[in-house]
Image (cartoon, helix red, strand yellow):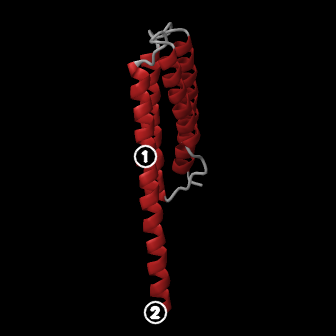
Amino acid sequence: MDPKTIKENIFNHYLKILTNSFAILALILFTLNFFSENKYNYILPTINALYISLLSIYATNKEFNRWKIKHKSKYSGEVFVYIWTFLIILAILISLFSKGKMTITDSTISSYIAVITIFAITRKSKSIFTKKNKNNIKNNVNINKKI
C-alpha cells in the first residue's frame, strides 16, 4: 500500500472516531438537557453544531471515496439515525405529557433534521452507485460475450 493510501486510511479512521464520539456526546447531552429541563442549554447548540459539521465532513468524505476509489464500507450510520429517531419521538411524547415543562431545543431539532437529511442523501448516493456499477458489470459481460 502506498503512503498516500495509508495516510487516507488513517485520516478516515480518526475522522470516524471523532464523528462517532461527538454523536454519542450530542445524544447524551440532548438526553441530559431534556430531562434536566434545559439545564445544559448553554453548551448544547455548540456540541450539536460541531457534531453536524463533523458528520457532514465524514459523510462527504465517505461518499467521495465510494465514487472515487470504489471503497466499500462495512459501517453504516443507520444505528445513530435509529437512536436519534427513538429519542426524538420519546422526547416529543414526554414533552406533551409534561405540559411544556420538558422541551426539545431548536438546536436539537435542527441537528436531527440534518442527521436524517445526510442519511437520506448518502443512502441515495449509495443506491445510484450500486445501480451504476451493476449496469457497468452487465455491459462488460455483454461486451465480453460478443468478443
Residue 105 image point, x, y percent: 42, 18
Q: Measuring 54% from the left and 18% from the top, which residue is drawn there?
A: 29
For label 2, the SS is: helix
Q: Amino acid at mark 2?
A: Lys
For label 1, the SS is: helix
Q: Residue furthest bottom?
A: 147
Can the viewer see residue 68?
no
Location of mark 1 (residue): 120
Residue 80 image point, x, y percent: 56, 36
**Crowd tier of the residue under label 1, counting other residues whose Cα lies within 10 Å: few below 14, some 14–19, many 20 or above:** few
Q: Nearer the viewer, residue 7 or 50?
A: 50
Q: Measuring 40% from the left and 21% from the top, which residue is drawn there?
A: 107
Q: Measuring 53% from the left and 56% from the top, which residue is drawn there?
A: 71
Q: Nearer the viewer, residue 124 or 11?
A: 124
Q: Measuring 52% from the left and 45% from the top, which residue is drawn there?
A: 8
Location of mark 2 (residue): 146
Whether residue 76 is situated above or below residue 17 in the rendered picture: below
